[in-house]
């Protein structure tokens, strides 16, 4: 597992690592949350098209992570092979409120620059903090979205009563 972990940069006292998953090691040794069946299914499906996990570490503690998936996955009807999907991204509770998520996403987008046309994120409408984080980074509202249970297929929708939105960021290659 450790061989698949690469130190990319250091900023604001944190170290940023990239992890390249395999079928037997989908999360890497730095994953800070419980691994649930739902996550195993979602990350297992993401393996086919490819994904990476970016971990932000403070000393020896993982404080945040951000997953980047290929937009060519059939789970996302609004993206293609030249796009990326940002998320899920999570900051552990004791580090929230310090703009860590926006710093992490900005750094990931900078590292991935030139590899995508657009970056997308889908977010629950009730998750105001995450929406504000994306806006702070430069994402803009793209569409409401329907997200299916378990597998989480994400589809654009014109229905304003949807529980999710899609945010879009132009890659400016």
Image (cartoon, rainbow, N blue to C red):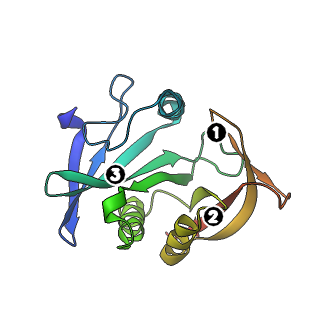
Q: Is residue 31 left or right of residue 3?
A: right
Q: Residue at x 22, y 73 (%)?
A: 12
Above-or-below relation of 55 to 117 = above
In which quarter of the view is residue 153 placed?
top right
Task: Name the quadrant of the N terminus.
Answer: top left
Q: CA distance from mark 1 to mark 3?
A: 21 Å
Above-or-below relation of 9 to 36 = below
* Residue 152, numbered circle: 1
Q: CA distance from mark 2 to mark 1?
A: 16 Å
Question: In the rendered structure, are the residues bearing label 3 and label 2 in contact, judged by CB atoms less than 8 Å apart?
Answer: no
Mark earlier in primary sequence (1, 3)? 3
Q: Position of residue 93 (x, y in %)?
A: 36, 58
Q: Mark 1 or mark 3, which is nearer to you?
A: 1
Front position in the image: 21 or 14: 14
Mark earlier in primary sequence (3, 2)? 3
* Residue 54, numbered circle: 3
Above-or-below relation of 147 to 38 = below
Q: Residue at x 46, y 56 (%)?
A: 115
Residue at label 2?
167
Q: Residue at x 23, y 42 (%)?
A: 5
Q: Residues within 10 Å of mark 2 (few under 14, many from 20)?
A: many
């Amino acid at each position: 597992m450790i061989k698949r972990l690469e130190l990319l940069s250091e900023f604001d006292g944190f170290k940023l690592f990239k992890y390249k998953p395999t079928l037997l090691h989908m999360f890497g040794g730095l994953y800070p949350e419980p691994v649930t069946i739902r996550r195993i299914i979602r990350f297992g499906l993401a393996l086919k098209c490819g994904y990476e996990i970016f971990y932000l570490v403070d000393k020896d503690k993982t404080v945040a992570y951000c997953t980047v998936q290929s937009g060519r996955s059939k789970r996302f009807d609004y993206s293609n092979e030249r796009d990326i999907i940002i998320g899920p991204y999570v900051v552990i509770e004791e580090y929230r409120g310090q703009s860590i998520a926006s710093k992490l996403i900005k750094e990931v987008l900078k590292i991935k620059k030139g590899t995508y046309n657009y970056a997308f994120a889908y977010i629950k409408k009730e998750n105001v903090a995450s929406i504000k984080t994306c806006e702070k980074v430069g994402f803009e509202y793209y569409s409401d979205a329907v997200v299916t249970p378990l597998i989480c297929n994400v589809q654009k929708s014109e229905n304003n009563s949807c529980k999710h939105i899609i945010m879009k960021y132009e890659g400016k290659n």
